[in-house]
């Protein structure tokens, strides 16, 4: 469930565009006004506001925001204003450039979006970067990481609920064999995780747990420092219980010395319209503290206000 | 007694692709019981002498006849089908038939546009309740699996922008992989698969050109050590050459039934795309117009249908 709060009576896009324009004029910027508008509009509404702004003032709203805002607050607003597919394409491209954590972002996008949405991301990637997503991911990764990530970003999983229990049993057995042999990058493991539908994978992993006594991620924890195994476990989590995955990303981002703002911004802006409500519940359950309170103690200023508005704090 | 000319016409009516329906009507329709009997006795390959004093149709030949009669119907059904359903069904059939038909997987994943391949993947969900990549991964074993799964999953950039320096260095990479072929099979080389399954077609054509400049040979000729890679490069870089070769093989006499099916498949799937270029390429390669080869090797309504399809658009 989304956490985004949109007012019952939404001003017209022309009014919103005019208010935003006013927020940029004069000395400094009226950040509170920007938040009060943008943090309370959904993707379709934001798109029309961008178009109206461009028609009325001849400028791209994103460029003006970039000029007027700075640092974490700016990044949160810019990511938020982007259309979801563009945003994912931007994040994925950025992830192929940076040195660390990049694999996780690509995996997260590939596994937590629906088949249709992932495809729209690939189209947006073509349009913006004049290359395919998979060619960049393949080029910037190697070895086991490439083996896992390229099939993940190119998957177009069947989205139905139909599950074949016989197949679930036999593929649970295959997974168990390969894991017992410590063949964590085996083609069969990759095949099952990167091509089967999410429902089928769920059934297979449930059977794994029933038949072999441990959840698969427990068996994959043999070497806690192995980066590939970490990614593999995260992949499985994203495919089967994304809210738990995102709760953990938020928890690590907030608890980290100094806070990982990029991770925090990424999760909030990409999930506010999807399942942020469930993630908040999971966060509260796991940390005994509401997410709002954690964000409040760890961030400040306009950046904090933007995040809180997106996770549904306060009124529309 | 049947006329020898009639017998010749009749034999031709049953051989090659499709059936010459008019010949059957005009000849067989007139025959009296004696002519039919001498036909049966005079063709021991079609009719077996039974111990109880009659000539039996050989079952195998009846099946062959059935396939030939169905050729026109299959062409019509395939022609009228939505291209996405068509390609999805062709992939499913190829997976069921096994390795001898896997060339079709390469053909479909490499000669369709990015959006056509996406459409095929969607249709596959509807028709078979599985994703194309899960079925390909499940059925294909061994060294070909990685390549095939990557090819069917591609969504290549379709613009013309190419980075020449990257193309040059990737041509080098491929050249090295081919040189090391006896140490490691190129089809199992991660870089070979990455380049062939993710780069855009214009980029691959630039690689083809650079490869030629580097090594003096064409990359698909050098790759003839590996049939699949060779087909992949041909489909991606010079599809009309690939298609005219497939057509020529299908139009040879006495090929097996799977190869024969390629004739319908190629003509139906390319009639609206690049049939004109394929005809030109065929003429260049084999010195004979495609229409004449079809005229000589196929029969009846099936022949007329094919000729009409390839004549569209000039």
Image: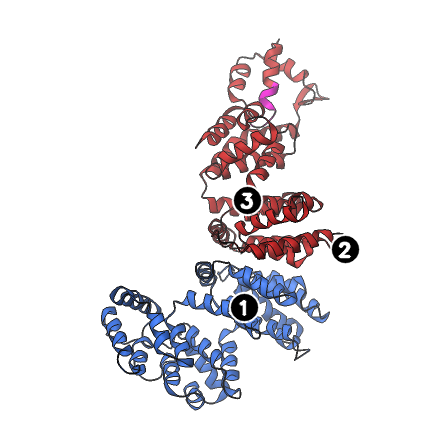
Chain colours: A blue, B red
Rendered location of residue B273, percent (x, y): 47, 39
- Say left or right for B47 vs A74: right
Magenta run includes residue B63: no
Image quarter where the N terminus of chain B lies is top right
Mark 1, other Cα within 10 Å: few <14 / some 14–19 / many ≥20: many
Please name whichever residue, A191 or B186, is drawn nearer the observer in this view of the structure.
B186
Report whether residue B93 is seen.
Answer: no
Q: CA distance from mark 1 to mark 2?
A: 31 Å
Label 3 CA crowd tier, 10 Å (few <14, some 14–19, many 20+): some
Task: Determine which residue is flagged by label 2.
Answer: B183
Secondary structure under tag 1 reads helix
Q: Mark 1 sits on what residue? A: A96
| In the rendered image, residues at marks 1 and 2 fall on the same chain | no
Viewer-closest of A140 and B29: A140
Q: Which residues are magenta?
A: B11-18
- The verdict on residue B14 being magenta is yes
- Classify residue A56 by image quadrant: bottom left
Q: Position of B270 compared to B177: left or right?
A: left
């Amino acid at each position: 469930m989304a956490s985004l709060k949109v007012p019952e009576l939404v001003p017209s896009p022309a009014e919103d565009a005019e208010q935003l324009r006013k927020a940029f004029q004069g000395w400094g910027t009226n950040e509170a006004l920007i938040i009060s508008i943008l943090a309370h509009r959904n993707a379709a509404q934001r798109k029309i506001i961008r178009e109206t702004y461009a028609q009325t003032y001849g400028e791209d709203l994103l460029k003006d925001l970039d000029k007027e805002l700075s640092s974490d607050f700016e990044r949160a607003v810019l990511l938020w204003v982007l259309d979801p597919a563009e945003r994912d394409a931007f994040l994925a491209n950025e992830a192929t450039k940076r040195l660390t954590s990049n694999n996780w972002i690509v995996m997260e996008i590939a596994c937590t979006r629906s088949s249709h949405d992932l495809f729209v991301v690939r189209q947006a990637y073509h349009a913006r970067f004049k290359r395919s997503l998979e060619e960049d991911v393949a080029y910037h990764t190697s070895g086991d990481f490439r083996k896992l990530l390229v099939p993940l970003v190119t998957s177009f999983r069947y989205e139905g609920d139909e599950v074949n229990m016989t197949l679930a049993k036999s593929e649970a057995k295959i997974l168990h064999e390969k894991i017992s042999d410590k063949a964590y990058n085996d083609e069969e493991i990759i095949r099952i995780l990167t091509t089967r539908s999410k429902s089928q994978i769920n059934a297979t992993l449930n059977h794994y747990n029933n038949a072999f006594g441990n959840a698969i991620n427990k068996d994959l924890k043999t070497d806690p420092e192995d980066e590939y195994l970490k990614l593999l476990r995260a992949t499985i989590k994203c495919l089967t219980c994304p809210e738990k995955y995102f709760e953990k990303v938020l928890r690590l981002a907030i608890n980290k010395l100094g806070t990982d703002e990029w991770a925090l911004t990424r999760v909030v802006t990409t999930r506010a319209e999807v399942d942020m409500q469930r993630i908040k519940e999971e966060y509260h359950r796991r940390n005994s503290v509401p997410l709002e309170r954690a964000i409040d103690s760890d961030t400040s200023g306009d950046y904090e206000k933007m995040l809180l508005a997106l996770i549904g704090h306060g009124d529309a | 007694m049947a006329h020898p000319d009639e017998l010749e016409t009749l034999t031709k009516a049953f051989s090659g692709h499709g059936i010459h329906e008019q010949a059957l009507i005009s000849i067989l329709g007139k025959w009296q019981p004696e002519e039919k009997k001498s036909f049966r006795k005079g063709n021991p390959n079609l009719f077996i002498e039974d111990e109880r004093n009659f000539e039996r149709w050989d079952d195998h030949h009846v099946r062959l006849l059935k396939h030939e009669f169905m050729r026109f119907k299959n062409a019509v059904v395939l022609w009228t089908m939505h291209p996405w359903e068509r390609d999805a069904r062709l992939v499913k059939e190829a997976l069921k038939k096994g390795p001898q038909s896997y060339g079709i997987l390469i053909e479909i994943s490499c000669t369709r546009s990015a959006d056509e391949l996406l459409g095929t993947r969607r249709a596959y969900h509807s028709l078979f309740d599985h994703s194309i990549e899960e079925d390909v991964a499940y059925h294909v074993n061994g060294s070909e699996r990685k390549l095939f799964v990557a090819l069917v999953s591609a969504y290549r950039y379709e613009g013309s922008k190419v980075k020449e320096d990257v193309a040059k260095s990737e041509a080098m990479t491929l050249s090295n992989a081919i040189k090391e072929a006896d140490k490691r099979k190129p089809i199992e080389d991660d870089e070979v698969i990455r380049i062939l399954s993710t780069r855009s077609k214009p980029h691959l054509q630039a690689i083809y050109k650079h490869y030629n400049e580097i090594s003096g040979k064409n990359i698909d000729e050098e790759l003839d050590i590996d049939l699949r890679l060779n087909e992949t490069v041909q489909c991606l870089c010079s599809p009309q050459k690939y298609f005219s070769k497939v057509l020529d093989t299908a139009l040879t006499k006495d090929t097996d039934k799977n190869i024969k099916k390629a004739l319908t498949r190629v003509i139906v799937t390319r009639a609206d795309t690049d049939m004109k270029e394929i005809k030109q390429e065929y003429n260049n390669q084999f010195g004979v117009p495609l229409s004449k080869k079809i005229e000589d090797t196929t029969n009846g309504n099936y022949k007329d249908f094919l000729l009409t399809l390839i004549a569209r658009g000039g």
